[in-house]
Image (spheres, helix red, strand yellow):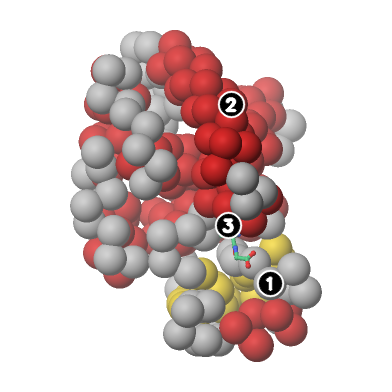
Amino acid sequence: MMKFYFSTATCSTACHIAIEELGLDYTPIEVSWKRNLNVAELNKLNPLGSVPVLVTDQGKTLTQNTAILEYLADQKPSAQLLEKQGTFERNETMSWVAFVASDLQKAFTPFFHAKNITASETNQKEIIDFYTKKLHDLLSYIEDKLTNKEYIMGKNFTIADAYLFTILGWTKWVKINTKDHKNITNYMKRVYDRPAVQKVLNKEGLIDYLQ
Ligand SMILES: N[C@@H](CCC(=O)N[C@@H](CS)C(=O)NCC(=O)O)C(=O)O
């Protein structure tokens, strides 16, 4: 059975949601740095020491949200979390996955690490102000792209939504209000209400994920 290494309230929630949406058999392995839970095991599999990590049924190790999400969706094409190889819709979905990984998620990093970057409170504030503006621009872009859509690709929930929902949820922790963005607010509620998402949020203790 495949093994899934995750840590609660991190980007690995995206893959956790995809696994539950697909109804795949898996062994969840929680990692906690604070409690030193399964950290050594994780580090052996991923020298970068980060989650998510997936060990496939064949015993192969896969890292990176983008790759794991795609791999998971391909285990059960009938669930249509990702379109077939060779379709342009698949490329569009992967474009959203890439956007979340390399634009959206990365824009949150300075909020969590400003104090490690500089001891100067003035400089910390400048960094946070810059990335607050950046995040507001990204939120406006997402808001526009969600116009008249249930999910980011349209009618169907895809792996891009598992990831987008997970990272948009972080706005609450960095105190960036999204409530003025009606499309985002409705979208977050729609994804939140999905049974598989509820299951994951309960397991990860994130039932108050929404703003
Ligand atoms: N590019 C990686 C990012 C992984 C990542 O940054 N994971 C974070 C949680 S969101 C983590 O494990 N941080 C702990 C650490 O790196 O020590 C991916 O998409 O999988």
Q: Counting other residues with Cα less than 10 Å from the Cα at mark 3, is it few (<14), some (14-19), or many (20 or more)?
A: many
Crowding around mark 2 (Cα neighbors within 10 Å: few <14, some 14 to 19, many 20+) is few
Camera-nearest residue between 156 and 39: 39
On the rendering, which quadrant does ligand 1 occupy?
A: bottom right
Tag count in the figure?
3
Which disc, if any, is residue 72? 3
Does the residue at mark 1 contact the one at mark 3 (Cβ under 8 Å)?
no
Q: Which residue is mark 2?
A: 130
Image quadrant for the C terminus? Answer: top left
Residue type, mark 1 in image: Gly
Q: Which residue is mark 1?
A: 49
Asked whether residue 201 appears in the rendered view, the answer is yes
CA gap, disc 2 to disc 3? 35 Å
Q: Residue at x 74, y 84 (%)?
A: 44
Image quarter where the N terminus lies is bottom right
Judge depth for marks 2 and 1 and give the one in front: 2
Relative to 206, 33 lies left or right: right
Q: Is mark 2 within 8 Å of ligand 1?
A: no
SS assignment at label 1: loop
Q: Is residue 186 above or below residue 58?
A: above
Which of marks 3 and 2 precedes in the sequence?
3
* 42 or 111, nearer to the observer: 111
**Residue, x 60% and y 66% (percent of image)?**
51
In the image, the residue with mark 1 has its CB under 8 Å from the nearest atom of ligand 1: yes
Q: Disc 2 or 1, which lies upstream in sequence?
A: 1
